[in-house]
Amino acid sequence: MEIGRAELGRDLVHALRTGPFSAALHLAIEDRGLRLEEIQARLAAAGVNVSVTTLSYWRRGRSRPERPDSLKAVHLLEEILALPAESLLAQLGPRRPRGRWLDQPPPGTIDIDRLFNDSGSVAKMVGELDRWMYHELTRLSLHDIYLVGGSRQEISLTCRQVLRANTDRVSRTVAIFSTDDLDAFTQINALRNCRLGRVRTDPSSGLIAAEIIFDRMLAQGDTVVLEYEFLSASLTATDRYYRGFSTPVSEFVLEVQFDRDAVPARCYRYERRGINAPDQGLREVWIGSMHGAHLIASDVPPGIVGMRWEWE
């Protein structure tokens, strides 16, 4: 039944670790170079009958295996595709909820409202723009550059993301920015491989959320590199920046660049499981001769990773 334990591709290894099931299955099939008809025939030879249409639906994220005979098929798929035992089954988690529970986050994710102080506002804005944000994209890499001005105020945030589609016909994502200066105007600009769609703001909380529309429609497994920026007119001193992750991310890079006239005395990196959770992994970060500090985090779980600094 097995085709041999061939080496797994990097994207496949990541998908088997972070999911979702559809992306892991799609990449495994691509990695092994098998047609769905071949897979169906091998399943049938082992006594499990699954249609090509069903396999296609599983692969594209339109449905997922849940019945006992379907789960047996997934176990056999791991053998056929030469995957580690239970690596696909682990992506399924508990049986998918029905009815009123459909808005709950999938296994391995957290609610986005756990990442912001004004949870009601951010959940409402994101819900209006991207109801399926947990399912459609895997965030492979994020790189944030946060600029701090000579009066210790935030100047801008430039974001670069590498995303992979988990299903067909994915065309957009959502970008969120939060400022402590409620009187400041914030502008968002699309820089590379994208354009702006709908924008939602909540002046009472300093939140802005915007659709980032890709320069092309993505099919399952396709990737895109995006770059966009937030420009802030804040006059308030800032003492931290963090990125919240509702889903796992393979790599996160954060650079904080300080003006030469506003270099803090100390800078620290920290992690949290949620906005109100205690700090974890707190340690000092070196501020270089060009007045910048950075951190790199790998295999980031859902939660918060950021830096904060002391001016005196």
Image (spheres, helix red, strand yellow):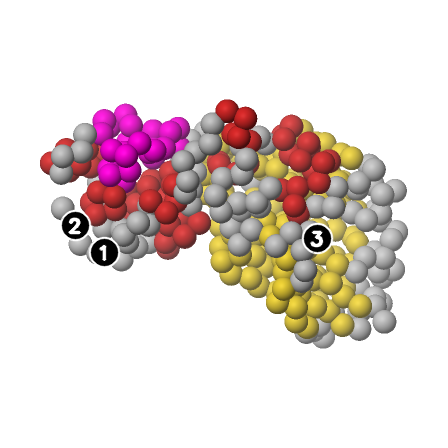
SS majority, magenta? helix
Report helix, strand or loop for mark 1. Answer: loop
Q: Which residue is mark 3?
A: 276
Is residue 254 shown to the viewer in this render? no
Out of 150 and 137, give the one closest to the viewer.
137
From mark 3 to mark 2, how far is it between C-alphas? 48 Å
Out of 67 and 11, give the one closest to the viewer.
67
Magenta range: 50-74
Compared across the picture, whether 105 is left or right of 44 comes to: right
Q: Percent position (x, y) of residue 201?
A: 76, 34
Q: Is residue 289 magenta?
A: no
Q: Amino acid at mark 3?
A: Asn
Q: Amino acid at mark 1?
A: Ala
Total count of labels = 3
The disc, 3 or 2, on the residue closer to the chain's N-terminal end is 2
Report helix, strand or loop for mark 2. Answer: loop
* Residue 87, disc: none
From mark 1 to mark 3, how far is it between C-alphas? 44 Å
Q: Amino acid at mark 2?
A: Ile
Q: Percent position (x, y) of residue 74?
A: 27, 40
From mark 2 to mark 1, how far is it between C-alphas? 8 Å
Q: Are marks 2 and 1 in contact (CB under 8 Å)?
A: yes
Out of 310 and 66, give the one closest to the viewer.
66
Q: Which residue is mark 1?
A: 6
Q: Percent position (x, y) of residue 312?
A: 85, 71
Is residue 119 shown to the viewer in this render? yes
